[in-house]
Structure formats: C-alpha cells, structure tokens
Image: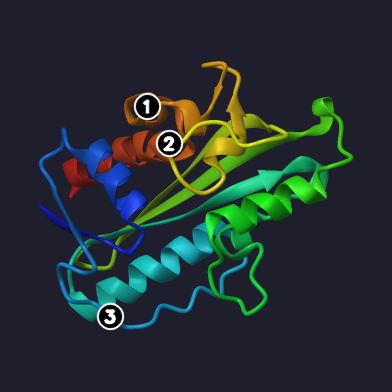
Amino acid sequence: MKIVAATNNKHKVSELTALFESQDTELVTLKEINFTDEIIEDGSTFLENARIKAMTVHKATGLPCIADDSGLCVDALGGEPGIYSARYASDNDENSDDLKNNEKLLSKLDQVPENERTARFVSALCFIDADGTEVSAIGKCEGIITREARGEGGFGYDPLFFFPGFGKTFGELTAEEKNEVSHRANAVKILKEKLEKYFSEK
C-alpha cells in the first residue's frame, strides 16, 4: 500500500520510513508526488495539526496519508514550546532553526533547578485512508532538559533531551536506539495495532 507522508521534514520521513519498513507499505514524500500546496496548521493541539496535514494532502491526492505533529513540552514552562516547537524562537511565525530554538529554551530554563526540568516529547500521528477514514495515535517519551547540548545526532531539541532509560540525550543515541523509545516510535506502535485491527475488519 502506498502512503503519503505529509511532511517535508526529511528527519521525520526518515524515522517514519524506518519504523514502517517491516510493513507491506511504501512511504512516499510530498516532494515525490509533487505536492506544493500550503498547509495551514492552525490547530490547538498536536493531534489537530496532524489531522489537518493528513486531510489536506488526502483531499488533494486521494491517496492514504499519514501525518505527524510533534514537539517538546516542558513542565516548568507550562508546556512550552508545545505546538510551537519548530518556531519557538521565531518572530514571524515561520520555523526557526534548531540552534535558536535550543538557545531560547535554555535561556528560559536558566534558573530552573535540575529536579524541575522534566519534559516530554509528544507525537501525534493521524492516518487518513483512501475513503477518508481516520485512525490516530499519540505517543510520548519522558525526559529531562539538560543545561547544554550533548550529541550530534537527531534533530530539533534532541541534544537537550536527556532520556534516563539510556542515560543519554536523544542527540547521543543512535538512530536505532531512538527508534526503540522515542515519542514517534511509541505513537507508531499504537497506530500499527489500530491499523491492523482496522484493516482486518475492513
């Protein structure tokens, strides 16, 4: 089955492809299907934005589509940056680069002690089938925000997100390690179970 991944983020495409590689599916990107329409993500939650992306691409192509909306939620900041994770340091509502986002996060947490730097990555996945049926899932991963970047791997806030289970930041994990425990991996596991049930009943 061909599924469109409704994102231009090469890192997300890479992670989703790796997570679905054992399934009888072919994940294609927006670039591969020449989709260039603007997608206005004006939802108030990760799931609402994932649904908007998936439905927009599905309506334009008629193909099954999967979309992810994800981000970092820091307890000491009332859940920031949340759905604004990619544009946290932006002053024009466009995505800002990882370095600036990370610098802003560290600055806002400068006076926050270690025991209050708890956070979680959240990933919402929304699958829209060819007939418009929706199947969705939310995955989370708990961690702690470090005081400086560690590791060269991953993307986004990964170098600042310490995962106690491995004793490393996401930036220090291999791609295989991250795909075992990440918020996106957890969301995919839940979605896979739901999709297996959905397709078996279809």
| Viewer-nearest of discs 2 and 3 | 2
| Front position among marks 1 and 3 | 1
Callout 1 touching callout 3 (CB < 8 Å): no
Give the residue at x 18% y 50%: 202
Q: Give the mark nearest the N terminus, 2 or 3.
A: 3
C-alpha distance separating marks 2 and 3: 29 Å
Whichever of labels 2 and 1 marks the residue nearer the N terminus, that label is 2
Amino acid type assigned to the residue bearing label 2 in the image: Gly
The mark nearer the N terminus, 1 or 3, is 3
Q: Is residue 139 visible?
A: yes
Specify the quadrant of the image occupied by residue 180: top left
Amino acid at circle 3: Thr
Q: Which residue is mark 2?
A: 153
Task: Locate residue 151, reporting x and y percent.
Answer: 50, 31
Q: Which mark is residue 36?
A: 3
Left or right relative to 44: residue 12: left
Q: Which mark is residue 34?
A: none
Q: Residue at x 77, y 41 (%)?
A: 75
- Give the alpha-carbon distance from disc 1 to disc 3, as whole Å: 32 Å
Are the residues at dot 2 and dot 1 in contact (C-beta closer than 8 Å)? yes
The spot of residue 80 in percent (x, y) is 72, 53
Q: Amino acid at mark 1?
A: Thr
**Residue matched to label 1:** 174
How far separated are the C-alphas under marks 2 and 1? 7 Å
Dot 2: within a 10 Å radius of its alpha carbon, few (fewer than 14), some, or many (20 or more) residues?
A: some
Determine the secondary structure under disc 2.
Answer: loop
Where does the image place residue 21, in percent across and percent down from the top left? 17, 37
